[in-house]
Image (cartoon, helix red, strand yellow):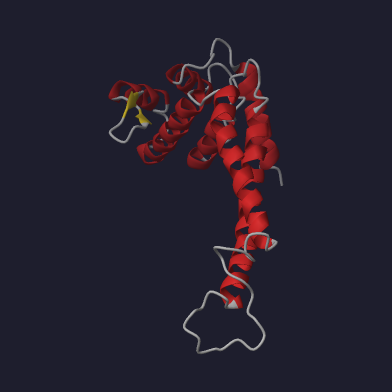
Amino acid sequence: MKKDEFGGWKFEEAELKAFADILKKYDSKQVEPFLTMLEFICFQMKIWKDLPAYQDVKEYANPVLHTFDKTIHYLNLLEKEQIARGIPFGYPEFAGSDRDAKDNRHRSKYVLDIIKNAETSRISLEELKAQIERQLQAWKSPPHRPSADSESFIFDIAKRYYEYFQEMPATTIEGTFYKVVCKALELVNLPYDDPRRKIKQAVNKLKATKAP
């Protein structure tokens, strides 16, 4: 595979020809869209393999989360009027205030708007912080030695194979699907010495999703 002009990955001509030769028993009207989707699956796998390690993600996220904590703290103060009641934000409206007065700093509307918006912002920021923390936790425990299909690579190929060729992929070494998978594993630099077990798992999972 080679980089395209947008920074992604695409098949080279020789690779497309190799896949076309493997899939020659099928009509080209089926093969072409399948290869387009296969290219996208392989592109995703290439990107996935280059994702940063947990420690790198944590080092990036920590200062962001720390900034969120400080901002949430000050939003809490605004929301609870500990800042909003004092300079520079003004005071709640005095009873009997002159509506025509030119000095609007004592108008309660501004103070109350600050309090309301502080609450809305705090809730949104707390939700965003929680989402980042959940993602960081999910990043913490990837497979130590990921298998060939730990990212659902073979299953995704099997699913599209079934979709475009309207037949369940065979799992035999001599089969077309096996050859397609081996070639795809080779192009994304995943282990492919003997992917039979992973192919069987992926096809069995696909069959289960298609069961009546």
Q: Is residue 9 visible?
A: yes
The answer to which quarter of the image holds residue 115 is: bottom right
In-front residue for pair 18/51: 51
Instruction: Tell me which residue sits at (47%, 16%) in the image.
Output: 189
How many numbered marks does the figure carry?
0
Instruction: Tell me which residue sits at (53%, 21%) in the image.
Output: 178
Q: Is residue 212 above or below residue 120?
A: above
Instruction: Tell me which residue sits at (59%, 30%) in the image.
Output: 152
Residue 113 location (% of width, % of height)? 59, 71
Q: Is residue 154 visible?
A: no
The answer to which quarter of the image holds residue 77 is: bottom right
Residue that extends furthest to the top in the rendered view of this protein: 193
Using residue 123 as the reference point, say whether residue 53 is left or right of it. Answer: left
Using residue 111 as the reference point, say whether residue 102 is left or right of it. Answer: left
In-front residue for pair 125/162: 125
Residue 169 location (% of width, % of height)? 57, 30
The quarter in which the N terminus is drawn is: top left
Residue 205 location (% of width, % of height)? 67, 33
Instruction: Tell me which residue sits at (61%, 44%) in the image.
Output: 70
In-front residue for pair 197/144: 144
Using residue 198 as the reference point, say whether residue 16 is left or right of it. Answer: left
